[in-house]
Image: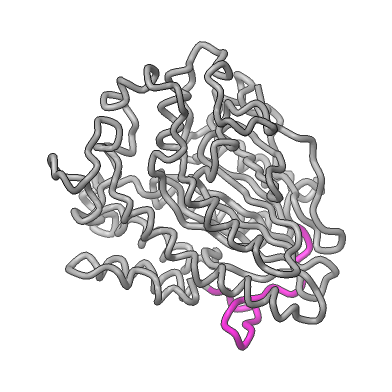
Amino acid sequence: MVLPMTMPRSSRAFSMFSGSNSIGRNKFITALRKTKLPHVEEESCGFTTLTNMERIYILSDLHTDHVRNMEWLQQRCASSNSSSAAPGPNDALIIAGDISHDLVTFENTIVLLQNNLKCSIFFVPGNHEAWMDNNNNNNTSFYHDNSISKLNAVIELCQKMGVYTTHCLVGTNKKYPLWIVPIHSWYDGSLMLQDCEDFIRDFPSWPWVDFIRCQWPAEHMRIGTDSTDDTTYLHRKFPKQSLVQMFLQQNEGALQDVAKFQEVNHDNKVAGLVTFSHFLSNQQSLPDWKDLREERGFQRQWLDHPGPGISAKFALVAGSARIDEQIRTLQQQPNNNEHIHVLGHSHRPKDFCYKGIRYIHHPLGKPQEREMQMISPNVDFKCIWDTSSGSVPSSQILRYW
């Protein structure tokens, strides 16, 4: 996504669905369950471990279909041997979505990272990965029935290339091991800004590309004026809640594994936790939130810039409060250690702690956003965890600009 300028146990998931489209969804789950690299170990309980992992880096929203972004990545990878700020062979890179909508560009990006950095890569799809791209009529491998089919192809490509799309316990022979847990999700309008209705009246005509390029199975779409469905002028363009539920169900097996591990407390070690989703999980993660002490919700006066309407409309497609509800179930577990949640999507950096979780958004974004300093022109891979010392501190970023 860009903010405009102005599962091993996942056979439980999708059991609620039936019908002809269930084949595609089951294929998605099968791809998730198969993702595994040959050099890892697997516990008897079913989850994957990487014993010698040292450092965890993040970078999201690579958008390498922009030529200048691919050039940036090529130059950065070429200089990685001379910099300690880049992941290496015993490190991991978490990419919180939006590499590219194009599968060839997606694959080329992964190859570039793997060949140069030689690190483990963790990925969760973003909204751009769900975009349909059926213009390549000369190659039927590019054709997808719908956006779930497209996401199937992304997950299967990750599987083929050894990119992790399921949960993993890393650094198990280190002092500070860590769970890395992808959180699959979508948006549902639940992060809507209160008292800003006048800014979103034109939402039905807002040119949000997802509404054109994402195509979901009929059972997830709002149709006509069915009185049993919410078809207000705001929500008519959104898929049904069943789509968000479908994605969130994929995460349940991973969260159960983490909870069980913490209960058993293997080797008297308490593992840290990094969950990561492309989409935002609370209003505090929105670009315009200013004061973490504010309990009344978003304040209209925070939209003190030339594009309040863009910010208000983006909040509708930013993420889902249900993501936060889901990841916070792990805070109820005994012996829980530090929890970091990595985000993507908004292209506005964030790094703050809120009610026991540290939220970080560290995007590459678009070239013009870096030029306009909406993102640091000197953006680089960001290290957030070291298995020899724990979390890596950083200055708070609540509203970047």
Q: Could you tell me residue 162's position as x and y percent?
A: 54, 68
> Residue 141 placed where, x, y %?
28, 59
Q: Residue furthest top?
A: 306
Secondary structure character of the magenta stretch overall:
loop
Q: Is residue 136 left or right of residue 323?
A: left
**Residue 190 versus residue 303 in the image, above or below:** below
Q: Is 37 covered by the magenta stretch?
A: yes
The reply, left or right, for residue 365 in relation to residue 189 is: right
**Residue 170 picture quarter:** bottom right
Image point 25% across, 56% down: which residue?
Answer: 144
Q: Quadrant of the C terminus?
A: top right
Number of numbered labels in the structure image: 0
Colour option used:
one colour
Q: Nearer the viewer, residue 273 or 331?
A: 331
The residue at 48%/15% (across/down) is: 307
- One can see residue 306 in this view: yes
Residue 310 position, x and y percent, is 44, 22
Q: Read off the magenta span.
A: 36-55
Horizontally, residue 268 falls left or right of residue 366, namely right
The vertical placement of 149 against 354, above or below, is below
Whether residue 82 is visible to the viewer of this picture, yes or no, is no
Q: In the rendered view, tell whether residue 362 sits above or below residue 400.
A: below
107 in the magenta segment: no
Tell me if 337 is positioned left or right of 244 in this view. Answer: right
Residue 96 percent across, percent down from the top left: 55, 49
Which residue is drawn at the image coordinates 76% and 62% (left, top)? Answer: 337
